[in-house]
Amino acid sequence: MKSHPFLRTSWLSLTRVVLATGVAAVLGAPLVAVAAQEPEPIPVANFTPYNDLPGFIQTNLSDELKAEIRSRKLAVFVISTTFSSLKTCYVSMGLTHAPAKGKSPRWPSYMVNAYSVEPKEWDENTCAPERLRAGLDVLNTTPLVELLKDIESTREDGETLRKKAQPGVVSIFTKDLSSANEEKVFSVLHKSKVSKAIDHRHVQTFVVGRAEDLGNGGVLCVAFAGLVARAPEGRAPHVPRSYESFARTQKGGDAQGCYGVVVPQAVEALVNRPWDAQGLLAQFDVTREEGIPLPNAKQAQRVQTALLKAQDARPAKQQLVRTTSVNRLTCSNECANGNCLRTFPNGRKERWQAPRVFNPMTQNWDWDTQTNGCGG
């Protein structure tokens, strides 16, 4: 395995070009007449480019999980990313409460993963579908007690959080990041001045990391960053439909060290978008919370425009240039036994006494008429 720089993918929506090869076509899963066999389809929160994924999960999900999902009114959450330059694909799956119509689900508290890094035969069209099969196998065999950890944090209802506005304060939701990496997130946000455009009583920056130990000291890490409505106390935020993601593989170090590279890059890419309804706030409404106003995209755009104009109008930083001026004196000297008369070009004359210095070559004391010959 080689060490790679970070790689970025940007999903402005799930209308990203869907690969011609679907999950069913790759894996040969029977998807015909699923509705007749399953009177109550399993909800799937599909954050992949594969439209046939819900049918694939419906067919291959274990009966135990289906029963639990139906009884608790849950959904299967699935997100996949493919980084062709790294020859890497990554899949995460978990359970969350089924979202209301027109809303994104809340981020699951526990997820299982499947990945492929630099296989001998790389095919970006089949990598993610094959990992989806592997991920579903892991989901089917994971104890329910694990999958249902803190499942209440994914419920839709919750007490709305209201706090007095504090200028310059930003709110973030992070998962699996160290405090040092959280500080990197805050640093990027403060530097961007996005808090001048976004009211963080109502909005928070969503930053999640996923990592895998590749063995032999290797690490794979993926970071996701998006903007979401601020979740109520005790609830995870809704997953952004528009986000930035970066991945990195490295030899040596640990997950947090890997996050330290990709997390700031993902957040920087997010805040460097246009601050409008097609950029920073794209599809924001699917993360909305009850009683929380949506951000004003036009106002945010005006703020960004003003900040950019102010930056362009700022005078260039002055460079201090140091110069040295040297006054050079010229004169002629007439000396006799150390008694000297020096004459300058303008006619001025000065008498002076030359000092005696020891000459190591002759072992004598000589008159020094040179060192201070013109009184400089």
Image (cartoon, grey):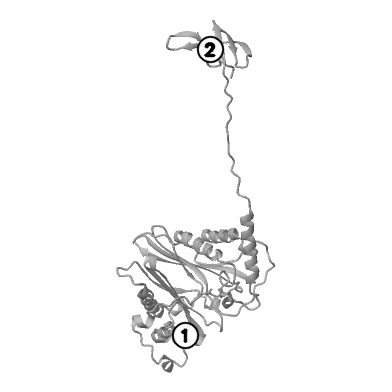
Q: Residues within 10 Å of mark 1 (few under 14, many from 20)?
A: few
Q: Can residue 32 be seen in this view?
A: yes
Q: Quadrant of the C terminus?
A: top right
- Amino acid type of the residue that numbered disc 1 sits on in the rendered structure: Glu
Residue toward you, 370 or 295: 370
Q: Is mark 2 on a helix, strand or loop?
A: loop
Q: How crowded is mark 2: few (under 14 residues within 10 Å), some or many (20 or more)?
A: some
Q: Mark 1 to mark 2: distance in Å?
A: 105 Å
Residue marked by disc 2: 369
Frontmost of labels 1 and 2 is 2
- Amino acid type of the residue that numbered disc 2 sits on in the rendered structure: Thr
Q: Is residue 169 visible?
A: no
Considering every residue shown, the one lying at the far front of the view is 346
Whole-percent x, y for residue 57 in the image: 41, 83
Q: Of marks 1 and 2, which one's residue comes earlier in the chain? A: 1
Left or right of 34 in this view: 177: right
Considering every residue shown, the one lying at the far bottom of the view is 36
Residue toward you, 267 or 208: 267
Residue marked by disc 1: 68
Residue toward you, 344 or 363: 344
Count of numbered labels shown in the rendering: 2
Q: Quadrant of the N terminus?
A: bottom left
Residue displayed at 68% across by 66% down: 165
Q: In which quarter of the image is residue 37?
A: bottom left
Q: In which quarter of the image is residue 206?
A: bottom right
Whole-percent x, y for residue 99 in the image: 54, 82
Left or right of 220 in this view: 298: right
Considering every residue shown, the one lying at the far right of the view is 164
Residue displayed at 44% across by 77% down: 49
Task: Give above or below for 140 relative to 117.
Answer: below
